[in-house]
Image (cartoon, helix red, strand yellow):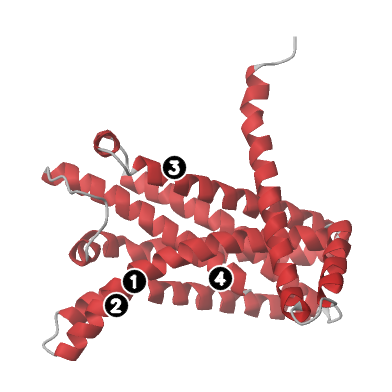
Amino acid sequence: MASSLLILLDDIAAVLDDVAVMSKMAAKKTAGVLGDDLALNAQQVSGVRAERELPVVWGVAKGSFINKLILVPLALLISVVAPWLINPLLMIGGLFLCYEGVEKVLHSLQHKKAKTGEAAQEELEQIETDLATFEKDKIKGAIRTDFILSAEIVVISLGTVAAATFGTKVMVLSVIAILMTVGVYGFVAMIVKIDDLGLYLTQQTSNVKQSIGRGLLVFAPKLMKTLTIVGTIAMFLVGGGIITHAVSTLHHWSEEAVDHIQHIPTVGSVIGALTPTLINLLIGIVAGLAVFVVNQQQPKCKAHPKR
C-alpha cells in the first residue's frame, strides 16, 4: 500500500513537472524572454504552475474514481465466475508497472542530456504544442498507472473478505475504494501546495513566518524530486512483487534465498529482512527491461514482414 502511494505521488509529481516546463516554454514565447534554465522560481510557481496543480490532481482523482467504479464490480464478478483469472491479470499489470519504471528511467536520462547546450534550448523554444492536449495526455498516463495500483488494492481487499457474504464484500470494497481515493489524492493535493504555503508565509510581516516560508520554498522542489526517485523505485518493487508472488518458482526461490541468508551469523537477520525487497526490485528491473526490449522490437518486425 505504501509503495502504491509513492508511485501515485511520483506520477502526479511527473505530470506537474512536465506541465510546468511546457507552460513556461509557452510563457517565454509570449513574453519573448529567454531564461538561463527551465527551473521555476516561487513567483512563477504561483503564477503558472500553481494554477494547474489542483486541476491536475483533481483530473487524476476523477480518473481514479472511475477506475474503481470499473474494478470493484469486475473483481467481484471475476472472483465468482473465474477466480483463477485474477493472478494472470495482476501479473500483466505488474509487467506494465516494471515497463513504466524502465521508461521513466530512460526518459530521465534523455531529459538530462537534452537540458544541456544552447541547441537543446533553441529546440525547446521551437516546439509548437497545445498545452491543454499535453496536460490531458499526461493525466491519462497517470490514470493508467492508478488503474493497476487500484486493481492491486481491490484484489488485496477482496482477499481479506474472501469468506464473507457477497453483500459484505460489496460494502467493504466500496468503502475502501472511496477512502483510498479521497485519502491518497487529498494527501497529494496537500503536498503539491507546499510551495504556495511557503510563498504565502514569505509575504507575512513576521520574521519567523518568512523564515519558515523560505524553508518550505527550498524544501518543496527537493521533496518532489525525491518522490520522483522513490516512486520510480516503488514501481519496480510493486511490479516485481506482483510477478514474484504470481510465479510460484520465483516465489519459492525467494523464500529459499531468505532462509539461507538468515542463517548467516550476526548479519543474517538484517540482510534476510531486506532480501525480499531486493529480490522484488531485481525481478522488477529485469522484467521491465525484457518488456521494453520486446516492445522496441515490434515496429521492426512490422517494418520487415516475412516474404
Residue at point 88%, 64% (across, down)? 252
**Which mark is nearer the camera, 2 or 3?**
3
Q: Say few, some or many: other residues with alpha carbon within 10 Å of mark 3 (under 14 / 14 to 19 / 20 or more).
A: few
Residue 80 placement: quadrant: bottom right
Determine if residue 146 is in view: no
Percent coordinates x, y for residue 224 in the rendering: 40, 66
Q: Is residue 2 above or below residue 131?
A: below
- Upstream in the sequence, badge 2 or badge 3? 3
- Upstream in the sequence, badge 4 or badge 2? 4
Q: Which residue of the protein is positioned furthest toward the front in this rendering?
A: 265
- Residue where numbered disc 2 is placed: 216
- Residue where numbered disc 3 is placed: 110
Contact flag, marks 2 and 3 (Cβ < 8 Å): no
Percent coordinates x, y for residue 98 in the rendering: 64, 53
Report how far apart the C-alphas of labels 4 and 3 lie in the structure. Answer: 26 Å
Looking at numbered disc 1 in the image, what kind of residue is underneath it? Ala
| SS type, badge 1 | helix
Q: Is residue 34 above or below residue 1?
A: above
Contact flag, marks 2 and 1 (Cβ < 8 Å): yes
Looking at numbered disc 3 in the image, what kind of residue is underneath it? Gln
**Which mark is nearer the camera, 4 or 1?**
1
Looking at numbered disc 2 in the image, what kind of residue is underneath it? Leu
Residue 52 placement: quadrant: bottom left
- Residue where numbered disc 1 is placed: 220
Residue 226 placement: quadrant: bottom left
| SS type, badge 2 | helix
Q: Say few, some or many: other residues with alpha carbon within 10 Å of mark 4 (under 14 / 14 to 19 / 20 or more).
A: some
**Which mark is nearer the camera, 4 or 2?**
2
Looking at numbered disc 4 in the image, what kind of residue is underneath it? Leu
